[in-house]
Image (cartoon, helix red, strand yellow):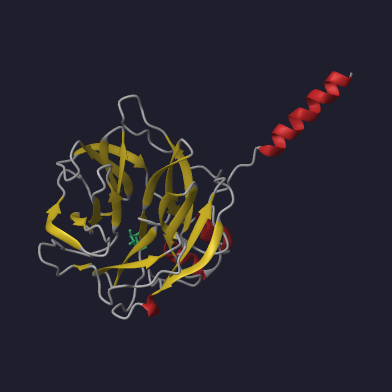
Amino acid sequence: MRKIYLFAGSLLIVVSCIVTAQNPVITHMYTADPSARVFNDTLYLYPSHDRDSARWWDMVDYHVFSTTDMVNFKDHGRALHIDDISWAEKYAWAPDAIERYGKYYFYFPTDQSNIGVAISDRPYGPFKDPLGKPLITKDSPGVVNNRDFIDPAVFIDDNGKAYMFVGQNVVNAIELNDDMISWSGEVRIIEGLDHFFEAIWMHKYNGKYYLSYSGDGRILYAWSDEIFGPYEFKGEILGPVNSGTNHHSIVEYKENWYLFYHNSDLALQKIPEDSEERKYVQWRRSVSFNQLFYNEDGTIRKVNPTKQ
Ligand code: FUB
């Protein structure tokens, strides 16, 4: 009898230790365009911040979140406000961040035209603009832009070289200098990203470069052995979501790979069905994530979004 009690007791302890994250993972505010990064064994989320009453993508500030258990995401508060950027007027859209030599660099688009950079000693800011001007704009020499110049994604390769990929309809790629707040060389245009629209993201897996992005309302990807390509289109990672825009990031944390993305599930839960406000849910997005798996040959399995 005593053995049975002991077994039941242990089972209870194990069961009570299994806690799963609920999607969406941030529920006290709307968040979109999640760039997930791992610094010092902590996963940080750098999303955009959709306003509670948004009726368009008129975002004005950024919050940074962190987790060490993939269940509880801590809000570190406002990391940057567009009013603190002298040259920017509006539209604090999808950002990204990276660490180099102990400093944290936050890259953000504004005015559908410019990419800024801001620095902090801490991964969650507050971030300060060191340049007093954009790092790169739609009018910089060599940039090809036929729509919005948005959605910067940064990447530091194994050899220490740093890059930024950016743009809508066309992916421009530049090499960042060691200081991470200037760049040099030519702007390269990335080929082979079939159906590319926006939300470019770079990651490396088993020595291959993967560029994933939003296209036709889905998250698609292509790969290459060379950072500037040409890339070979490989397929779909995530199907269309209920927020219209689809935006993601891919990150490895504690030996698992994850796909972060956004949808309008939270707004649909919060806003009553008979409310006029419901027609604005595409501008009130929230971040979710699911585990991501590779096949033996390195291709990525399609992700099935879940509530947990
Ligand atoms: O959040 C504003 C814009 O919507 C982003 O920059 C795009 O990627 C899309 O998600």
Left or right of 36: which side holds 229? left
Q: Quadrant of residue 183?
A: bottom left
Rendered location of residue 255, percent (x, y): 46, 35
Q: Is residue 39 visible from the viewing direction of this image?
A: yes
Residue name at image x 38 percent, y 49 percent: 249
Please state, as top left, top right, bottom left or bottom right, where the C terminus lies in the image: top right
Horizontally, residue 68 falls left or right of residue 295, namely right
Residue in the image at 44% along x and 50% along y: 39
Q: Residue furthest right?
A: 1
Q: Seen from this angle, which residue lies furthest front?
A: 101
What residue is rendered at 37% in x and 66% in y?
119
> Measured from the top left, where is residue 12 in percent x and y?
76, 33
Residue nearest the viewer, comparing 111 with 135: 135
Residue 26 appears at what percent x and percent y? 54, 57
Q: Quadrant of ligand 1?
A: bottom left
Answer above or below: position of 85 versus 234: below
On the picture, is 257 further left or further right than 176?
right
**The N terminus is located in which quarter?**
top right
